[in-house]
Image (spheres, rainbow, N blue to C red):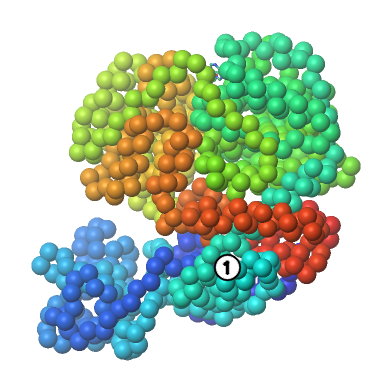
């Protein structure tokens, strides 16, 4: 159970004074639904402002505080900005500008004719001075506002700096002192503050060590949890499985296995023959042939008289795996079934029965296959195809833990497959001390994908190229970006693109996005993979594992908005057949240098491991990872730079702690339990006795 000490931190943000229902959505969008989340929402940077008497006194680009009197409201049509024209004491005019749906709020806080103090960055917009999204609008306090060094927090629509700052201060007031879990020698050597002080200081930007300490805490929690699970796994009983090769011998594959596949299968086979359950990660770039490796592993389990399960991250992928495996295993006589959240009634009943009586050898599905209502006769191998989703290690371990919760059960062997080529520095963070196999050799005969960067102005040419491609009997993907912060606008853009392309290519186009009903999504995917539809317009749902060899052209719109790893994943959808494939990266005209470098690299190389390293390098230390939409690491607090610098230390420290006090019973061990709960790595604690 969570230590009571932490209860105030896990209270909902809505329980803080003054948080009304209007803030619920923005808080959710920022993933700040609990007090602890607010504490760890650290500032991007800090600003210092100057109080100025009038606009002549200020320079565009400067952060200022100024008294202004609103004179006039101006709304632009559609989703254009809302402006309040306001006047200083000399009669100079400045526009206060809001984008998004903020007009109502702006009018309420800025009644015409009433002088207000405004804080924000002054900009020149054509002939006009303006302040976009002022940080503060208030009755008084101009003097104090000018003195403050203020944190600047990542925001979303419906949330202001002022509001968020207040909320975080309230959250800090709720934070208790916590027992120290960091080794005293290290704490002294680094000069790090205690936990609570570190939080307060980090929000003020005052102590350089404060943020490092908070990041270190997160890394330590992660290392500890992964180690606890790993150690518990070593102590468990699995089922040694010895395949006799009779089923694998009947597989008739249309190709010879690559050296890497053969080696990997041997590694898995030897793990599965052991008494301790396997805990292995299979890393292999998109298209490296992980599916057949999974099949061989599952056949070993079936040859040994047990069952195997394959867990896919999405419905689409589960169905695709099912089709592929049924086809590949046709000559073997094994019984393969599928189970997802959508299977109901009779069909579901009969599948459940088959799993229980053992007439089903291999089950493929989404997480539905691990629900409590699903019981197996003798499940001895679980394969998790998580593609690039983060936290594969944790998922794997959790799945494994789930299987042992029933008394007397043996722990199944686990194989996790990921297509994310993660940089070496991050392997430890993601997977702890798991055994790793790498498919570092592509099947022969793959042609390089011709990758080109094209500006959006050449849209006409791009559509022309698609048209020729379809006329020649090919199929194509057209990918539109979709991120959580910008969901509505992105979806609208994808739908508009679909409409435009549908006009041009009539009945040949189909649209898939995350908000479609599952049946509609499947139907659309089926139409595309069956060849009835030639062009698939999609948001990033297709990223995970879709395999249509005849689709050899991909267009990625606003490619600059994607990370390298994601672009690589997307591009991996083409180049799957024997024909030459092309990937067109459409970009806007205002590009940051990093974005330009990223697109350049995409053109240059197709090596996923290299792209992962370069991605890490390009983003440097400044960018927060694991935050918000980026799922590259399982971290929210630690930056890439901090991970690189502090992770080895945390890993070492965790190892020492476990060697001395494996049950986390002594004083520091107890503090470490608090840490694990604080960072929600309590699945690590729960494996300990008395956790
Ligand atoms: P991923 O690692 O991305 O899951 P898949 O298992 O889907 O890759 O394999 C990609 C494609 O390569 C499939 O069409 C598969 O049949 C084919 N393939 C797998 N192994 C080989 C091989 N050794 N030689 C030729 N083609 C192969
Ligand atoms: Mg795959």
**Relative image position of residue 218 (x, y in whole percent):** 60, 60
User: In this view of the protein, which residue sits in the foreground, 435 or 499?
Assistant: 435
* Residue drawn where x is 85% and y is 39% of the image: 237
Residue 667 x, y percent position in the rendering: 78, 70
Whether residue 233 is visible: yes
Judge whether 293 appears above or below 64 on screen: above
Q: Is residue 514 above or below residue 168?
A: above
Quadrant position of residue 458: top left
Ligand 1 image-quadrant field: top right
Quarter assignment of residue 181: bottom right
Residue 366 coordinates in the image, percent (x, y) = 63, 38
557 in relation to 626, above or below:
above
Instruction: Kindly identify which residue carries mark 1.
Output: 190
> What is the quadrant of the N terminus in the image?
bottom right
Q: Could you tell me residue 75's position as x and y percent? A: 21, 66
Q: Which residue is drawn at 67% across and 74% down?
A: 178
Q: Residue furthest right?
A: 408
Q: In this view, does 69 lie to the left or right of 426?
A: left
Q: In the drawing, does residue 180 fall left or right of residue 603?
A: right
Q: Can residue 107 be seen in this view?
A: no
Residue, x 66% and y 16% (percent of image)?
A: 329
- For the residue pair 445 and 306, the one nearer the viewer reads as 445
Which quadrant of the figure contains the C terminus?
Answer: bottom right
């Amino acid at each position: 159970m969570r230590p009571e000490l932490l209860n105030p931190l896990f209270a909902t943000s809505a329980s803080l004074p003054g948080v009304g229902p209007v803030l619920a959505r923005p808080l959710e969008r920022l993933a700040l639904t609990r007090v602890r989340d607010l504490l760890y929402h650290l500032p991007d940077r800090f600003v210092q402002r100057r109080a100025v008497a009038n606009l002549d006194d200020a320079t565009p680009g400067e952060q200022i505080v100024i008294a202004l009197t609103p004179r006039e409201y101006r709304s632009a049509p559609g989703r254009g900005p809302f402006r309040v024209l306001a006047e200083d004491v000399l009669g100079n005019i400045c526009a206060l500008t809001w984008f998004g749906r903020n007009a109502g709020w702006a009018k309420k806080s800025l009644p015409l004719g009433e002088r207000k103090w405004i804080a924000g960055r002054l900009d020149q917009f054509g002939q006009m001075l303006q302040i976009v999204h002022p940080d503060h609008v208030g009755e008084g306090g101009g003097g104090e506002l000018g003195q403050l060094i203020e944190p600047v927090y990542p925001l979303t629509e419906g949330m202001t700096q002022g509001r968020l700052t207040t909320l975080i201060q309230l959250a800090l007031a709720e934070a208790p002192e916590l027992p120290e879990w960091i080794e005293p020698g290290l704490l002294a050597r680094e000069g790090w503050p205690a936990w609570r002080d570190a939080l307060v200081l980090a929000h003020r930007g005052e102590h350089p060590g404060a943020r490092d300490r908070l990041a270190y805490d997160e890394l330590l929690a992660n290392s500890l949890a992964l180690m606890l699970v790993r150690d518990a796994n070593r102590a468990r009983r699995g089922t040694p499985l010895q395949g006799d090769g009779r089923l694998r011998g009947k597989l008739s594959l249309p190709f010879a296995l690559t050296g890497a596949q053969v080696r990997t299968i041997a590694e898995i086979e030897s793990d599965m023959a052991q008494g301790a359950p396997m805990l292995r990660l299979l890393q292999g770039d998109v298209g490296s042939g992980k599916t057949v490796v999974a099949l061989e592993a599952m056949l070993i389990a079936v040859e040994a008289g047990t069952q195997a399960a394959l867990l896919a991250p999405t419905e689409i992928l589960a169905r695709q795996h099912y089709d592929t495996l049924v086809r590949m295993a046709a000559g073997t006589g094994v019984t393969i079934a599928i189970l997802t959240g959508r299977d109901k009634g009779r069909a579901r009943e009969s599948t459940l029965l088959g799993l229980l009586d053992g007439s089903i050898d291999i089950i493929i599905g989404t997480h539905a296959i691990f629900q409590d209502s699903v019981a197996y006769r003798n499940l001895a191998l679980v394969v998790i195809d998580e593609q690039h989703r983060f936290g594969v290690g944790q998922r794997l371990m959790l799945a494994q833990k789930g299987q042992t919760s029933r008394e007397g059960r043996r722990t199944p062997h686990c194989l996790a497959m990921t297509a994310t080529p993660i940089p070496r520095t991050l392997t430890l963070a993601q997977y702890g001390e798991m055994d790793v196999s790498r498919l570092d050799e592509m099947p022969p005969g793959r042609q390089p994908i011709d990758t080109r960067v094209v500006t959006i102005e050449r849209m006409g040419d791009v559509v022309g190229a698609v048209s020729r491609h379809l006329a020649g009997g090919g199929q194509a993907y057209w990918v539109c970006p979709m991120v959580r912060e910008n969901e509505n606008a992105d979806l609208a853009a994808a739908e508009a693109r679909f409409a435009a392309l549908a006009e041009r290519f009539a009945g040949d186009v189909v649209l898939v996005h995350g908000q479609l009903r599952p049946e509609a999504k499947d139907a659309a995917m089926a139409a595309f993979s069956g060849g009835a539809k030639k062009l698939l317009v999609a948001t990033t749902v297709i990223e995970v594992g879709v395999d249509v060899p005849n689709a050899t052209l991909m267009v990625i719109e606003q490619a600059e908005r994607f990370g390298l790893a994601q672009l690589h994943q997307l591009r991996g959808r083409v180049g799957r057949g024997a024909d030459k494939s092309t990937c067109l990266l459409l970009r806007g005209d205002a590009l940051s240098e990093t974005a330009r470098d990223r697109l350049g690299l995409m053109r240059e190389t197709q090596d996923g491991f290299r792209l992962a390293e370069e991605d890490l390098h390009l983003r440097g230390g400044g960018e927060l990872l694991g935050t918000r939409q980026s799922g590259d690491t399982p971290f929210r607090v630690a930056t890439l730079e901090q991970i690189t610098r502090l992770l080895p230390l945390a890993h070492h420290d965790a190892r020492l702690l476990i060697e001395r006090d494996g049950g986390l019973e002594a004083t520091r061990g107890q503090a470490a339990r608090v840490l694990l709960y604080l960072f929600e790595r309590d699945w690590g604690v729960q494996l300990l006795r008395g956790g």
